[in-house]
Image: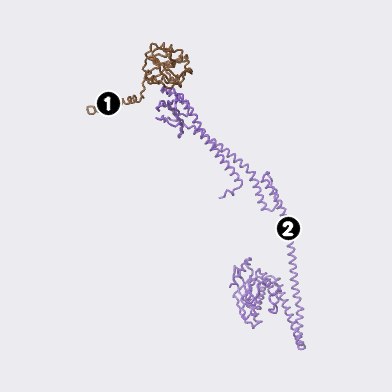
Chain colours: A brown, B purple
Amino acid sequence: MHNPLKRKWTRSKKLLAASLLWIPLLLNASTGFAKTEQDIKAAFLYNFMKFIAWPYDEEQIEFNLCVIGDDPVNEKLKMLQSRPIHKLNLHVEHFYALNSEITCHVVFVGESENKFADKIIEFYAHTPTLTVSSIEGFVNKGGMVGFITLGNIIRFNINLKQAKKTQLSISSKLLELANQVEQ
Amino acid sequence: MTKFKDFPIRTKLICFIMISTLSSVFILSSVFVIQRYHSFKLQITDEFSAITQIIADRSNAAILFEDQRALGEILSSLELHPQVILACTYNAEATLLAQYTKTNETTPSSSDCPRKPITVKDYFSESYFHISEPINVNGEKSGLIYIQASTSKLVNEVITTALSALSLSTLIIFLAFAFARYIQRFISNPLIELQQSTANVSLEREAMPELKKRNDDEIGALVDSFNEMIKTIAKQNDIIIAHTDNLELEVHARTKELALANRELEAFSYSVSHDLKAPLRTIEGFSLALEEDYGDQLDETALHYLSRVRAGSDKMSQLISNLLQLSRVTRLELNKQAVDMSSLASKILHDLQKDDKDRDIQIHIQKNLTATGDPMLIEILLDNVIANAWKYSHKVPLALIEIGSHAHLGNTIYYIKDNGAGFDMKYANQLFKPFNRLHSAEEFDGTGIGLATVARIIERHHGKIWVNSERNSGTTFYFTLFPKSSNSAEAEVEFVNQHKKL
């Protein structure tokens, strides 16, 4: 490799290769195809609702997703606002303290509430409310669905026992897909 | 080559039954196989549509969570279905998420999932069935299941159906053939019997045994009528035979009687003629003696009377000898040999000229004119005919007698032609009867027996004689002797007409 011309060429090729590597990322970003962890989690959360049946309540006009505390997913969850679910429109509610005024169908516990997870779980333990969180060991604490990361794939665990207590019925299809199911 | 319509009834019947059976069996089998094929197709479509729907339904959660492992597991449950060789799951963006390929040694999995899922719901390709089903979650299309199945089962089913239809058809055809063979007995066997009996009836004259009646159908009725007909024929046959026998006997008896009567008549006429001659000779002899011995003592009137007596007895003598000749002609045995007609004719004419030297007459006789027959009878024949010609051409200033022959259709036709008085052809049929004269005795003398004798001679030679004449322009006699063909009547007429023109 003593030929300077050749070396020069090789360098330019490296540059070209590097720039080319960036193209798919750029494309993904611009077209919205790039699925970040948050995107996937938000989608999963929305999909969970499809495979879970809530006890029937005629007066319901909105389906409430309550987000408690801060979490990287929050921004994405807000985008679920007004999405149809179980023939109702999804309404996203965000607060930092436990609120008994709003009937929450789904509660997403942000990572910031790690320390208060037990309290929150306890708060919703007797109402048909699906509790979801990315907090580690959330299912073991009595939460119903907990996101986990296996390598670069996002999976989830389900606490069926807790769900049964609150009259939520989880589709077997969803259970099949769960990484672990607590019974 | 024999035409179908000439085949025996037995073959025709079997053919008809077989043709109708074959065509109906063929049509039924084809319809059956085609119907089975379509129902199998429908069955396959239904079956795989259900399977695909189940798979799609089971996959809807997994597709939402993009769990490719779960999707693969769901697809691999298709392993239980032997026909499925390929199954694919696509997401809503038509990206392949999971694939199931049947791993089998007999059917190497050559195919992979298409990059883009098919757009039609289902279709049959050459040896595969393709079906796709969208994966719906709450009415939202989230993906697509595509299944490809082998149609070898369909092909096998169709082949099995066709084979069973074929074996069933063969059985039916055999049964039909056996049945046809059996049923044709009732129709063709009685007919064959009937036909054979009819053939026997025409061959043998014996009375037919009655035919056995087998069934009470039209053929039975035919057998009945046939038996009835046979009976009638036998009865009529008996009557006819009886009549024939009777008739033969009668004819025989009559012939005998007739022959006896003929012989008696001939003997009678011979003896009468012969016996008449003696008294006639007495009359002749004594009238001659009277004229010679007492001629000078008798006056003129007495002499005239005497000459009348002698002329009368002469005439009678001639008549008697003619009658004797006629009876001899009939009676004498035929002595068949070659006869020289030319010399006979010239001798006769020579004799005639000797008696009548003053006649200026032209005579043509064909040279080497020969015939086969009795020389004596032929001489009498020629004598009579030529004498006729001589006699009736008497009053013609330039008389001509011509004797000759023509060859016609292998026979020789002889003719004797004169240019004499002739006669009206309407009397021609009376010419050859004895004592019939066409001219008065004053005009031409004669006994009227001559041509009857001629006719008898011709008859004895199995020949024919006919005449062509015209008043005041001559007569031609034609005759044949032992002609080769007996049916020459028309030929003669034709011949005469030809020569009339000449």
Residue B288, image x and y in percent?
Answer: 75, 84
Callout 1 secondary element: helix
Q: Which residue is mark 2?
A: B243
Query: Is residue B162 in view?
Result: no
Query: Is residue A82 in view?
Result: yes
Q: Relative to B228, is A35 on the left or the right?
A: left
Residue B377, image x and y in percent?
Answer: 67, 73
Residue B85, image x and y in percent?
Answer: 45, 29
Q: Relative to B246, is B79 on the left or the right?
A: left
Q: Residues within 10 Å of mark 1 (few under 14, many from 20)?
A: few
Q: CA distance from mark 1 to mark 2?
A: 142 Å
Q: Which residue is mark 1?
A: A15
**Could you say which quadrant of the image residue B344 lies in?**
bottom right
Callout 2 secondary element: helix
Q: Could you tell me which residue is drawn at 74 percent across and 64 percent down? A: B254
Amino acid at the residue labelled 1: Leu
Labels 1 and 2 positioned on one and the same chain: no
